[in-house]
Amino acid sequence: MPYTEAKEHAPGRLHAIFTDPYSAFDNEVVERRLHLRVALQALLDKPSREGRLVLRVLHGWANGEADPQSLGHSDHPLSQRGDLLPVVARYQAAIDEQQAPPREAQTLLAEPLAEAIAAAEARGQTIDTETRSNPAHWPSFERGLGLYTFFKVYHRLTYGEDESYRVARCETPEGPREIHEFHLEECEFGVVTGLEGDDRARVILLVHAGALPPLAAFVETMLGE
């Protein structure tokens, strides 16, 4: 079965605002800070006011590791900018006390991956060891493309990325989603949102635990100006 490429560098919500969002946030752009403030407002303001915004903090991968089983996360509702600070404090306290970071019971990749593989095998498809262990092969079975797309997003948010901005589109069990990634000198984060016109979907602000304090400062600075 041929693999299907993820729709990265796809048109998204910010294309209705910026002529070229892929260059709007580069360091040499004169109005960069204005562009960033407009982008954050467009992606986060309304979901926050409507109670649809969730902060998702990633942790568990380090030193090049990318095992789905090792990727942990915690979710935190955000209804106002000040909601970020208690999450920062909670993670810092875990570090100071040498405790495990907050973690949800369900996994972001391991459980959905196992379920997708089981469903494919139930339909008669053979999923070999290489396909199971190599994320680039996940698109060969149903729901695998979405899992592979998110795997790459989580990996870039954990280990960094050269491009300042990119957006991908993929299907999820909750419907089609846009994944906006910002890899800025201030911080790195992602925003998972519905397509343009979908104002009911939950919006997820993605950040690695190591980038949580600078993200909180960045959001306060950008939206507080």
Image: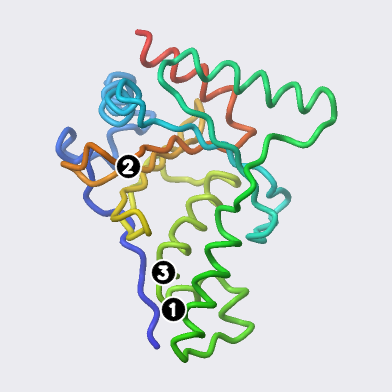
Identity of the residue drawn at 29% across and 42% down: 22
Measured from the top left, where is residue 143 in percent x and y?
41, 69
Identity of the residue drawn at 31% across and 20% down: 49
Q: Residue tagged by mark 2?
A: 193
Q: Are marks 2 and 1 in contact (CB under 8 Å)?
A: no
Q: Residue tagged by mark 1?
A: 141
Q: Earlier in the sequence, mark 2 or mark 3?
A: 3
- Which residue occupies the extreme right position in the image? 98
- Which residue occupies the extreme top position in the image? 225
Q: Secondary structure at mark 3?
A: loop
Q: CA distance from mark 2 to mark 3?
A: 18 Å
Q: Residue tagged by mark 3?
A: 143
- Of the pair 220 and 146, the residue shown nearer to us: 146
Callout 2: 10 Å neighbours few (<14), some, many (20+)?
many
**Quarter of the image where one finds residue 87:** top right
Q: Are marks 1 and 3 in contact (CB under 8 Å)?
A: yes
**Quarter of the image where one finds residue 31:** top left
Q: With 162 as the anchor, is 73 left or right in this view?
A: right
Identity of the residue drawn at 41% across and 20% down: 79
Callout 3: 10 Å neighbours few (<14), some, many (20+)?
many
- Of the pair 186 and 204, the residue shown nearer to us: 204
Three-letter code for the amino acid on which mark 2 is drawn: Thr
Against 202, residue 169 (above or below) is: below
Against 114, residue 160 (above or below) is: above
Three-letter code for the amino acid on which mark 1 is drawn: Phe
